[in-house]
Amino acid sequence: MRKSISTLTLACLVTASALASSDRERETLVRYRQAQMEFREGNVAVIGPLINSLESAVGRSPHNADLWEALGNACMSKLGVSYDSSTGPAALIALAERARSAYARALSIEKDNALLLASLGMAEMALSGLKQDGPGMMKSVENMNAAIVMAPNSTAVRLTRGFMIVGLPVGMRDTAAVKEDLTFLLGVAPGGRPEDVLHVLLGDVYAETGALDDARREYEQVTGASRFASEQARSRLDELKKGAVSPASVGAVRANLGRCVMCHAPGTDN
């Protein structure tokens, strides 16, 4: 009888500890989402303490994929805003490596999670770009392609791959995949500014591959909901009258696309 009571007491203590841990994990994830929203509103200072908090959380709960994913997202957010700062190459590489490791750990727990695989590819691409690692760049694209195969109708996965690979040199990237992703995103876009920007992006892909009529069609569909996209579309239509869209014009829109994906963390925005 005494042994049974002891066993029951131990079971209760273990259960209580597990419940307390679960509550703490949920609270950490709630704080993470709040901090990410503050970050997107311009409060860059929240991201450092957020990373520290998540580092502690994964130390306490190393088998929680959501916490590892959140840590990867937070590291990528910090990386996205660090390129234009005084942060040195070594620190940028360390951030990208930490993000890659966090996503890989999350993926080891949830092996069938397509968004985690796309996120891993995103981190690998950022890291490969910093290290000028060609084979690593190809591996990153392979992982994002595999994520599309797993979840072809996922907006988050399509956005991650499309926005990351569109900036690769034409001879290096899979242009058909970029067109596929941007066309998919146009099909699910809520209209307004996002749709305007997507039309410009897709038009640029057509323009730089010589499909000028298709490019013109995309530029002409810009409604004006986005003033930036409207200005870009008008300038491109003027350029097309003279023959072609300049690489400088294309680069002006694409310059920060990869960083947009990093800062907004795949899957947390529509």
Image (cartoon, rainbow, N blue to C red):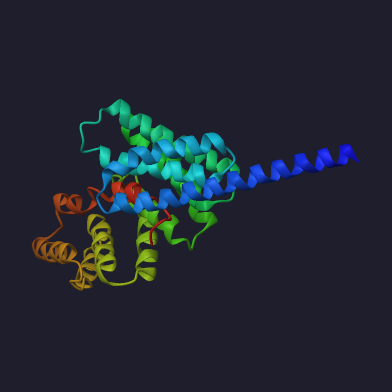
Look at 26% across and 56% down and name the residue there.
Answer: 209
Asked if 158 appears above or below 213 in the picture, the reply is above
Residue that sits furthest to the front in the current view: 2
Q: How many marks?
A: 0
Residue that sits furthest to the right in the current view: 1
Asked if 186 appears above or below 201 in the picture, the reply is below
Tell me if 199 is positioned left or right of 246 in this view. right
Where residue 11 appears, as percent x and y from the top left, is 76, 42
Q: In which quarter of the image is the N terminus?
A: top right
Where residue 191 appears, as percent x and y from the top left, is 30, 72
Where residue 52 appears, as percent x and y from the top left, is 41, 35
**Image quadrant in which you'd find residue 245:** bottom left
- Viewer-proximal residue among 93 and 166: 93
Asked if 81 appears above or below 254 in the picture, the reply is above
Look at 38% across and 41% down and name the residue there.
Answer: 50
- Viewer-proximal residue among 116 and 26: 26
- Viewer-proximal residue among 59 and 190: 59
**Image quadrant in which you'd find residue 225:** bottom left
Where residue 154 appears, as percent x and y from the top left, is 47, 61
Tell me if 162 is positioned left or right of 152 in this view. left
Tell me if 240 is positioned left or right of 152 in this view. left
Asked whether residue 189 is in view, the answer is yes
- Viewer-proximal residue among 196 and 133: 196
